[in-house]
């Protein structure tokens, strides 16, 4: 392949036979889908949309993009792409840290696993090669212990990505954990690893940054992008909200506009939100500000809680996790939240889904639909249910199947705050209309990271819009969805989109790979990725009528002052959205597929 920025080496690992083969990247695919999420979706698409997610026939891809591991700011991302056992959709889930950069420094663009190993194995990656090693002694161990053992076994310049007991037990929202506290959390990607007896990846490589095709142009583009990051009021090191408070800088802002789902979204604000906010954590239990490869922002907030039953020292309290175990469960116990996050990280379980599942169980208990008493804000019971879910014990076996099957089993499917089987993050569609549309139309189930309209509705990037207005949100969302599909394909953090624009991405990509590309052309790649995902889902049987929201957001008006009386006008926005996308009731027509050169 003539493009720069790639190792041009993919390892295909057949876990059933133990065979490992290496191949280059098809250049046409690289030009159309770039890498990371984009190329991963193409591999999953080519493997077939009818595959059972937990069967040996499913593939799971660990991929980086052409900017991953380079000097490009915030370029430490790895994409895990597969068919989801939680939603039945194609899914991708990303993590930061150094494993993505190290995979590229080790001379590979990606690993693709298929089949099922006869006994537990882990993949050892070094110098462009992959070796399968026995992981029988690691099976049954959680993430933190597994990582400690493998780091001790393989020395310096090593990243470990692993599943915990939740993945082994096929919890349908199990995660892959990277470097203890960085998760590829959503979509049940960890369960796919467990179904294959694949315990971990060990990636060993010292820093060896890829060289751009045009080094002078890359330096100019990188300097310009870094200047934008440094000057942004959101990402600016030591001054921007993300840098000072981390992602949990959002807690009070979202609460103030009446868009913080509380007590399983029965309410839209939480009276004690400050106790779980980034500001309170920064003032009380913050001990350090870790970061990822090539990132000046340092949004991770390492904390140590007070001595006692919830004492823990862990790397990062993220907004979504603080909300899911906080307001969504009616819980304002500050120290319980890092403890619960750390517990989920150790088991390898998605904190967003876990918190939502707990909140749904609390509502079921409140309605006396279940015998088990699970009161709002009962943190001891929350801890107990995390253990039971990860181990599939008692009621936890029901919860481990995901929120929609669990709510149905409890007798009231309407309690599931989810779309396409995946639970909703920390934004109430009655107070953030664009995000409501984003949840409904996300290709991997409810997700804020497919198209983050709160950047506009709250922060004012790229322009300020009214969070309570539905008009115009469809075109805004499409813009975000295409742009953020692009960042995922390049291998850079989505938080860079708070400062960088499509011109910045195009300039860095062009200089790295040696292909002239302007903003419009590179955004077309993002649009192509989004449409390929939707086409895959359509072929998998997810068609008309799948872009919906829980009835609670459509029929039960908000009672919070800032959004009082509002519901989410989804039908109006969907009509506008499908027109902007060129889709027919959520289905990609043949002419659109041809126009984007997908077929």
Image (cartoon, grey):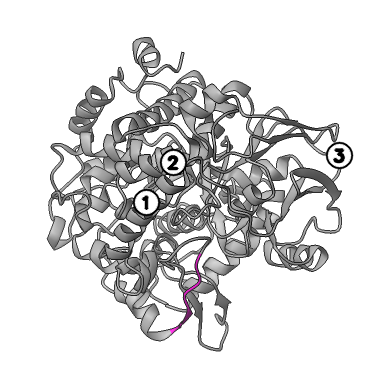
For disc 3, the marked residue is: 118
Looking at the rendering, the stretch of residues picked out in magenta corresponds to 285-291
Dot 2 crowding, Cα within 10 Å, few <14, some 14–19, many 20+: many
| Marks 1/3: CA–CA distance | 51 Å
Dot 1 crowding, Cα within 10 Å, few <14, some 14–19, many 20+: some
| Magenta-drawn stretch contains 529 | no
For disc 1, the marked residue is: 220
Q: Position of residue 500 (x, y in %)?
A: 32, 51
Q: Position of residue 598 (x, y in %)?
A: 45, 18
Which numbered disc flags the more N-terminal residue, 1 or 2?
1
**Relative height, residue 80 to residue 534 (above, below):** below
Q: Nearer the viewer, residue 341 or 463?
A: 463
| Marks 1/2: CA–CA distance | 9 Å
Q: Secondary structure at mark 2?
A: helix
Query: Which label sits on residue 511?
Result: 2
Mark 1 and mark 2 residues within 8 Å of each other at the beta carbon: yes
**Relative height, residue 515 to residue 311 (above, below):** above
| Marks 2/3: CA–CA distance | 45 Å
Q: Position of residue 38 (x, y in %)?
A: 49, 33
Q: Residue furthest front?
A: 216
- The residue at 37%/51% (across/down) is 220
Mark 2 and mark 3 residues within 8 Å of each other at the beta carbon: no
């Amino acid at each position: 392949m003539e493009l720069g920025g790639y190792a041009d080496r993919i390892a295909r690992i057949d876990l059933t036979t133990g065979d490992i083969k290496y191949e280059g990247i098809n250049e046409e695919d690289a030009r159309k889908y770039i890498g990371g999420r984009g190329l991963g979706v193409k591999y999953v698409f080519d493997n077939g949309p009818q595959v059972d997610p937990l069967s040996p026939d499913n593939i799971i891809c660990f991929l980086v993009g052409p900017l991953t591991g380079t000097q490009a700011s915030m370029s430490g991302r790895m994409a895990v792409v597969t068919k989801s056992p939680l939603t039945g959709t194609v899914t991708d889930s990303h993590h930061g840290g150094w494993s993505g950069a190290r995979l590229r420094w080790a001379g590979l663009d990606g690993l693709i696993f298929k089949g099922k190993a006869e006994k537990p194995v882990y993949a050892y990656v070094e110098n462009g090669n992959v070796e399968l090693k026995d992981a029988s002694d690691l099976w049954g161990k959680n993430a933190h212990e597994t990582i400690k053992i493998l780091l001790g076994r393989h020395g310096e310049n090593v990243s470990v990505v692993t599943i915990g007991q939740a993945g082994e037990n096929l919890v349908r929202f199990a995660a892959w954990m990277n470097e203890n506290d960085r998760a590829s959390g959503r979509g049940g990607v960890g369960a796919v690893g467990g179904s294959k007896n694949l315990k971990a990846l060990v990636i060993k490589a010292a820093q060896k940054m890829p060289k751009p095709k045009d080094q002078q142009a890359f330096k100019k583009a990188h300097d310009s992008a870094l200047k934008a990051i440094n000057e942004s009021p959101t990402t600016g090191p030591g001054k921007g909200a993300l840098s000072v408070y981390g992602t949990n800088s959002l807690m009070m802002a979202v609460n103030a506009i009446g868009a913080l789902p509380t007590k399983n979204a029965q309410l839209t604000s939480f009276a004690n939100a400050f106790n779980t906010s980034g500001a309170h954590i920064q003032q009380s239990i913050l001990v350090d500000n870790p970061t990822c490869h090539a990132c000046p922002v340092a949004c991770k907030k390492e904390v140590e809680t007070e001595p006692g039953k919830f004492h823990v020292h862990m790397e990062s309290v993220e907004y979504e996790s603080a909300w899911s175990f906080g307001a969504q469960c009616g819980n304002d116990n500050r120290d319980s939240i890092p403890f619960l996050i750390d517990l989920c990280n150790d088991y390898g379980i998605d904190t967003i889904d876990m918190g939502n599942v707990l909140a749904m169980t609390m509502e079921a208990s409140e309605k006396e639909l279940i015998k088990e008493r699970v009161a709002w804000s009962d943190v001891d019971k929350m801890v107990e249910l995390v253990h039971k879910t990860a181990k599939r014990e008692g009621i936890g076996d029901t919860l481990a199947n995901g929120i929609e099957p669990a709510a149905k089993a409890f007798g009231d499917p309407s309690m599931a705050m989810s779309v396409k089987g995946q639970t909703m993050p920390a934004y109430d569609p009655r107070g953030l209309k664009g995000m409501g549309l984003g949840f409904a139309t996300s290709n991997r189930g409810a997700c804020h990271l497919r198209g983050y309209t709160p950047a506009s509705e709250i922060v004012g990037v790229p322009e300020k819009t009214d969070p309570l207005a539905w008009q115009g949100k469809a075109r805004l969302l499409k813009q975000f969805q295409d742009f953020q599909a692009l960042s995922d394909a390049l291998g850079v953090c989505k938080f860079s989109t708070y400062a960088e624009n499509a011109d910045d991405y195009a300039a860095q990509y062009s200089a790295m790979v040696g292909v002239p590309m302007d903003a419009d052309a590179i955004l077309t790649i993002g649009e192509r990725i989004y449409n390929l995902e939707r086409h895959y889902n359509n072929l998998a049987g997810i068609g008309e009528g799948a872009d919906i929201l829980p009835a609670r957001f459509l029929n039960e008006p908000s009672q919070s002052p800032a959004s009082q009386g509002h519901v989410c006008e989804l039908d109006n926005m969907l009509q506008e959205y499908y027109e902007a996308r060129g889709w027919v009731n959520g289905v990609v027509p043949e002419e659109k597929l041809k126009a984007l050169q997908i077929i």
